Image (cartoon, coloured by chain):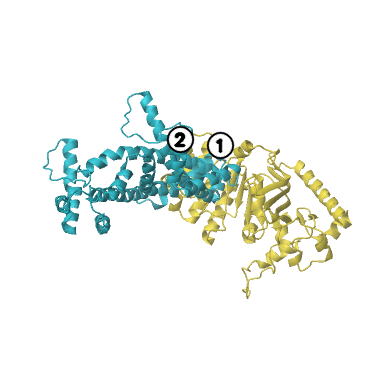
Chain colours: A cyan, B yellow
Amino acid sequence: MLFISLVIFLVIKLSPSDPTAGLPLTIPPDVREKIRESLGFNDPFHIQFLLWLKQLVYTEPKFWMNKLWGTDFEVGQRMISYATRSPVMDLVVQRIPQTLWVVGISYIVGILIAVPLGIISAYKQYSIFDQIGTFISMIGFSVPTFFTGVLMILLFSVTLGWFPSIYDTTHEITDWNSFLFQVKQSIMPIMVLGLFNAAQISRYMRASMLENLTQDYVRTARAKGVKERSVVLVHVLRNSMIPVVTVIALNLPSVFGGALITEQVFQVNGLGQLLILAIQGGDVPVVQTVTVIFAVLIVLFSLIADVLYGMLDPRIRYD
Amino acid sequence: MVSSTLRQLSEDEKSQAGQAHGADNVLEVRDLQTVFETQDGTVHAVNNVSFALKPGELLGVVGESGSGKSVSMMSLLKLLPMPPAKILNGEVLFDGRDLLQASEDELRSLRGGDIGFIFQDPMTSLNPVFTVGFQLMEPLRIHMGMNKKQARARAVELLELVGIPSASDRLKDFPHQFSGGMRQRVMIAIALACDPKVLIADEPTTALDVTVQAQIIELVKDLREKLGMAIVWITHDLGVVAGIADRVAVMYGGQIVEYADVDKLYDDPRHPYTRALLKTLPADEGLRMERLVSIPGQAPNLKGPLVACPFAPRCEEAHERCWSANPPLFEVQAGQKSACWLESEDTAGAA
């Protein structure tokens, strides 16, 4: 983790970005220099890095503990965004619900579509259903989300006018109608991301099912008089889920990455949009913190994948 | 020539049918014909296979790889992937019912219930992600309507029956925690779970080492006496069959080429293929042979229907007739039939 954050830090520092670049040109150079100075931008690399690290793992946890459990640790200088002058973690916390809502639901939708699709496609291999399923997942897989997103906006917002083209983050759910509006405005980003996820996962599901359907134990199950439905949904599915669950868990962080672009298309101001704006504005603390959060997610979900793998497959269970 | 073959075939059928009605066969197969529709054409895997089994009898089915042994037995309960497999013709009478006409539900109630199956490879035939107990209790709960507790008790009983030590503890183990021989015992326990009337054992000992093989054979002999079920034992080991079978069907090219009581087959093998097979058995007494005997040539390609004797290319006694028509089974003597033109003079003379 430490290494990852160091690398991220160095990469950002080596890029020729300047937090004051976005400020009006009327600001004289010496004032700009002072602004840089006040942001700590001119300190040596290792000081900046260690300060950031201290803020991330020491200052911020203390602040959140105070806030959540009413403890009163002495909180030092919190991590401040160059561009907005507000604490980075506050920004992140503001943005997370939108991202979780869109990414989380789209992933669940994707899985819910992909698993049955993969099962049926494999069971009825080369049937019309399988052909169509394969075709759709090919499209979902190969067409990038920024294209399908814009296409959907064009179709459903501009032409048909069914859904709003822009996601309104300030919208609050107070009653049934406002809930419906929330659903309506989420449908498109969720479907775009969900289609992409479903395409990927259903391919894995189909391949894994096909591999298992021809195994000897399937014949044994049939010879025992097990119902065809249970043969497929109990015996084969349990085996087929092993690699698929791993893929699902391992892909989750990359979905956050994919959400970056989708969020941009639909103007969902989630984590992805925060990251993009921060990169454009040379806002080093934000970029670094958000990327490290992604890195943490990747490690975390790899771990979850391993644990799930052990739960599903008794052969590699650790005794 | 073709018409005479047909006539002889139908006579043969009649004689079989006559036998069948007289005896109380638990399983009777008539003219079973299974093909595989592949991209390169139709493979005739099983051609007019007929046999019958009385309760408590053990039929050995021998033949080399690809002779249609397993496919014919799996055709009985439609356990083959269909397509590509297709059963063109035949009757499978179990307790007087034709299984080939039975619905999927009827078949399912027989599979694992009245007809048990043991498969060749114990390493892959058990589901790796479920406990042995679950897999053993499944047929009990399906066919005998037992609840979890009853099924568990019966499962323990079964594992003890097949000689697995500390059975009740091992129910919650997974297949990978068992050795090959133990897994095959589990397979046997699954097949025996619902007291089947017929047990079909598809090379149950092929994947096992010789000591374990001997144990399994003893076990099956024992169980057969105890439970009185009819057994079809598929193997390519003639030595095993000699020890346990009542009757033997020798298969070649997807058809039965010799069908005889076990002592007659070993005393007086009539089909050249059977004779060749028996010669390949390593002698267990006297001087050791220099090297193992083998039958020259390869198993026949079964694309297309058989128009000649499938064994003709490898047969030392092949003559003109063998190349022009496929011989039907001739009754050589009571309890022995051979599909060879060399026998046709005898029967033709008699008829």
Q: Is residue A3 above or below residue B127?
A: below
Amino acid type of the residue that numbered disc 2 sits on in the rendered structure:
Val
Residue A232 as seen in the image, left or right of residue A260 = right
Residue A276: percent from left, percent from top: 31, 47
Amino acid type of the residue that numbered disc 1 sits on in the rendered structure:
His
Residue identifier under label 2: A158
Mark drawn on residue B143: 1
Residue A202: percent from left, percent from top: 48, 45
Residue B76: percent from left, percent from top: 66, 46
Q: Nearer the viewer, residue B286 or A270?
A: A270
Please tell me which residue is depicted at 36% across the width and 46% down the height of the picture. Answer: A260
Kindly indicate the quadrant of the structure image that contains residue A70: top left
Q: Is residue A54 above or below residue A117?
A: below
Q: Nearer the viewer, residue B104 or B221?
A: B104
The reply to whether label 2 and label 1 mark residues of one chain is: no
Kindly indicate the quadrant of the structure image that contains residue A171: top left
